Image (cartoon, helix red, strand yellow):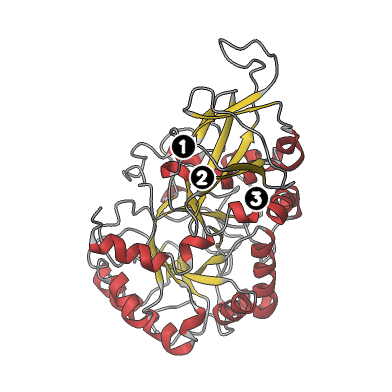
Amino acid sequence: MNLNHDFSARKKRVNQWFAPARLGIFFHWGFFTGGGLTSHDKAMHKSLRYRTVDEFEAAAPDPEVVAENMVATAKRIGAKYINYTCMHCNGGYGVMFPTEQEEFVLKTEKDYLGALIEAAHRAGLRLMIYMMMSYHDAVTPDGVYLKNVNNQEQMRDLLGRLVAEIGERYDKSKIGGFWLDGGFTEPFLDFPAHIKSIFPDAMVTVNCCTFLEVKDVDFGTLEFVATEPVPVYNRPSGGTLVNSFGVGAPPDNFIEDIPHCESWWYWDEKTPLMVQNSKNYLEDPDFLLHEMISSIGQRGQWNYVLGIPVRLDGTVEEKYDPMFQRVEQFLSWGSEAVYNTRGGIKSPVRPGSFHGGGFCSVTQSLEDPDCCYILITDPPSVEKSGFFLQQEHLYGAFDTNGREPVSVEDLRTKQKISFTMPGGMGIYLEQLDWSDVREYGVKVLKVRF
């Protein structure tokens, strides 16, 4: 099979660290932390929470404290990298380090970006730097936030200089890449190439870019699904149609799924929509775990990056502890089914609903494609063995496209599991203990071919 050169080059780049990482976390943090609804909806515009640098830095803890808290949260959830809003707009623009670019009205005197770069590096995490590719919040009802920036061309020039400054100011080897938002059109189509001219090893992610038409873009994102997922945690199933933003269904490879729990920012007051959005996560401690598993195990080379509200000190609210604990508990024994894998859509085992009335995701080792993991998040519910068999018990039958495994093993207990292939299409498992789905949120079978 002949692969396109640009596809092969992209695959080689992302496999250096980004694709094997699989899990990240998204922190929106800065002048807008605790602010209001985004100014893109002018009818509901609310200004930045912290209108001046002095006001923000008087309220925010020391940069080292914020950075260490963010890193601690990332490690709890098993994230291997952090997406961080170095420069974001939310009714205005603010830069989280003392940049020399004079166009920015709001730029911190303390180096919050630098502190996070160092803290993430010490913890073995990569940092992806977020930037907004749009000038549209340069002037808002609350004031001017960008001086002498009146169009996209001027914004592109400004951000080009900002990237160059970051490359000069910090150790490039400690920066994983850049996460670009705000509409990918001219004059920004050359921006990924500009970034890589300064950061040759950087990953470049562009939000809502699903077709990856620019070869210097490494990953696109699925932020907005078009339909309700089935099951409710299975976001890939909701990404099969064009969504409300006109973004097409994401491909099997090079997509970062970025759901957000409650909202992107930490809020003093919650809107009904934000409260509803958080219910799935807060009312079911397994929801986050199941969503993460389905995102990495239903399609191909997808990453999962949770967006979660962050307090001004870089911590998250204690109400999220139960769902974090479930992820921690699973990763303590199930991490090999997550890291350094790809989704199972092209593996020998088919992900999705399986015979017996359950639902599973599948991951496939990047190092050994003959090693697959079946992650069962909904256990079997049909208490019979099929039309022609009379035994009354829960069972699971998984399509393997006719391939016969060498072995099936319970990943947590390391016990071998007996199986049959009565019709030759897949493996049939009888009288299996499914209690791990209840005890740990997931049962994992390690299948070798």
Q: Secondary structure at mark 3?
A: loop
Kindly indicate whether the residue at mark 3 contacts the one at mark 1 (C-beta within 8 angstroms): no
Left or right: 427, with 417 as reference point: left
Query: Which residue is drawn at the image coordinates 31% and 80% (left, top)?
Result: 197
Q: Who is closer to the viewer here, 445 or 187?
A: 445
Q: Tag 3 or tag 1, which sits nearer the N-term?
A: 3
Estimate the x, y position of residue 45 in percent, counting from the top left. Answer: 47, 54
Residue 233 at x, y percent in the picture: 57, 38
Of badges 2 and 3, nearer the viewer stands 2
Q: Is residue 96 above or below residue 41?
A: below
> Would you name the residue on which mark 3 appears?
269
Using the numbered discs, state the Cα–Cα distance from disc 2 to disc 3 in whole angstroms: 53 Å
Q: Label 1 vs label 3: CA separation?
A: 54 Å
Label whose residue precedes the other's in the sequence (2 or 3): 3
Disc 1 is placed on an element classified as loop
Seen from the viewer's position, the closer of residues 278 and 416 is 416
Question: Does the image show residue 67?
Answer: yes
Instruction: Write down the residue under mark 1.
Output: 403
Indicate the amino acid at tag 2: Phe
Mark 1 and 2 residues: CB-CB less than 8 Å, in contact?
Answer: yes
Residue, disc 2? 449
Q: Give the distance between the C-alpha atoms of the residues marked 1 and 2, in whole angstroms.
A: 7 Å
* Amino acid of disc 3: Glu
Which dot, 1 or 3, sits closer to the camera? 1
